[in-house]
Each structure stands twice: as C-alpha cells, then as structure tokens.
Image (tube, helix red, strand yellow):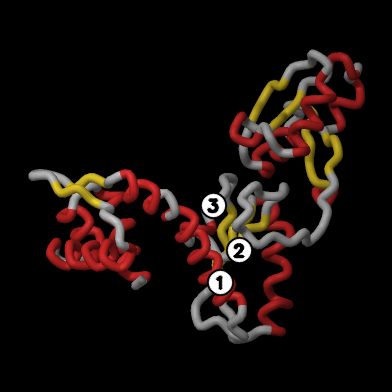
Amino acid sequence: MDWQDLHFFFALARCGSLSAAARELGVDHATVGRRIAALESSLGLRLTERLPRRTTLTGHGRIIASGADEMYRIADRIRIQARSLCAEPAVPINISASPAVAAHLIAPAIAGFTRKHPGITLSLSGVSHHVLLNKSEADIAVRLERPDDPDLMTRRIGTMRFGLYASQFWQEIPQEDWVFIAYDSTLAHVTQQQWLESLLNGRRVIFRASDLMAQQQAARKGLGIVTLPLLYG
C-alpha cells in the first residue's frame, strides 16, 4: 500500500467529492481518482461509491477513513520530535505562554539562553488562550496546568505558588466584607481560580479578567482582593 494513496483517500473522505479533494490537494480530479483506485486495488476493498455529483464512502471506506485523525496525530508527533532532535534549528522557535508568564519568567531568561545557543532565534507570544500545537500555532507552550492531549510531549518545569494580594485599604475592611478579583469564565478550570472560588464563602467577585496583569492593576487601585503568583509580591 502506498501511504500517499491513503492521504488522497482521507482528503476525499473529508471533502466529499473528487473535485473538492483535488482543489485541497492542488491536483486535478483525475489524479485523485487514480490514487483512490490504486488504494482500493492494493487493499482489495471497494471504498467509494461514485454518484453524479459527489462521491460517497462505502461501509469499508468509512471504517478506513475513521483512522485518519489518529494517523495525522502520529504524523504531527513525528514532525515535532524530528524538529526537537535538530541540534540548531534553522527556523525560529515559537513559544506561547500566558502574558504574565511570558513577561515575568520567560522574557528575562531569553538573554541567557541566546548566549548559550546563539544560532537559535526565539519568538515569544503572550496569550491567554491555549494555542493548538498540533496545528503548528506554536512549537512550545508553557501552561499552568497539564494538558489533556495524550499526543503532546509534556514536561513539568516548575511550580508556581499563588497568594492573596490587595491594596492597604483592605487591611481596615472586615474579611466578611471583602470583594474579589478573579479570572473570567474561560479560565474557570485553572487551579488558582478554583482555589479562589473555594475561599469566597458567598462573597462577591466584583471584577473578572482573563489577563493576570489586568487583575493586578485593578487590585492596585483598591478594587478588591486578587490571587497572584508570589513572584508578583
């Protein structure tokens, strides 16, 4: 079996017609047809049913197509591993992290890294959302929790501790009257947010933001109590 034939078949399964698959692959529809015919011949199975306006998959075809996602994940993992084995990458390494981690932990360490590895160029993106590594949105992602995707190569690089911070104004306010600054709903799952929620005991969250530095600035102005990394203290 030619793996390239399988690649063409997966494109057809995704697109639903020979012409649409041909456009995606940058070839003519006859080439797609030949590749799929070759795959059917090598497997000894009929995988497609050609109709006037589209091409459907047979039962056997649907079973074969169901393996597409797994094969592409394996291919992505091999690609990532191959890049990591290069002694001195010829292309920039793109790193993604939260704005706070990017600014306070990674950026200060870049000078020392580049002195040790002068041939490597780094690109750092501080974003609140999780980028998709298997879609090449970044090469390395630094996250505050372990990812669920089993196909990602993960390594714990440290522990970040959090504490409660506020302006001096709140020292005079009874704890039962405290109000809090928290993450928005997109980050409700992170450990520090869950810890803060456990401390509320019915008290109000007065402001939510996905950006930790925005939370810090609001707390400095006396808005409320905020959960911040100890490195901010």
Query: In the figure, is residue 51 to the left or right of 231?
Result: left
Q: Quadrant of residue 218?
A: top right
Question: Label for residue 131?
Answer: 3
Q: Identify the residue at image location x=68%, y=72%.
A: 110
Front position in the image: 2 or 8: 2
Query: In the figure, is residue 115 to the left or right of 1?
Result: right
Residue type pointed to by label 3: Val
Residue type pointed to by label 1: Ile
Of mark 3 and mark 2, the one earlier in the sequence is 3
**Which residue, given by chain and number where applicable, does mark 1 sit on?**
93
In the image, farthest residue toward the left: 52
Cα distance in 3D space between marks 2 and 1: 8 Å
Residue 195 in view: yes
Residue type pointed to by label 2: Ile
Question: Label for residue 14?
Answer: none
- Where 1 sits versus 149, above or below? below
Q: Disc 2 vs disc 1: Cβ atoms closer than 8 Å?
A: yes
Front position in the image: 73 or 211: 73
Cα distance in 3D space between marks 3 and 1: 14 Å
**Which residue, given by chain and number where applicable, does mark 2 sit on?**
140
- Where 37 sits versus 225, above or below? below
Q: Identify the residue at image location x=15%, y=55%.
A: 19
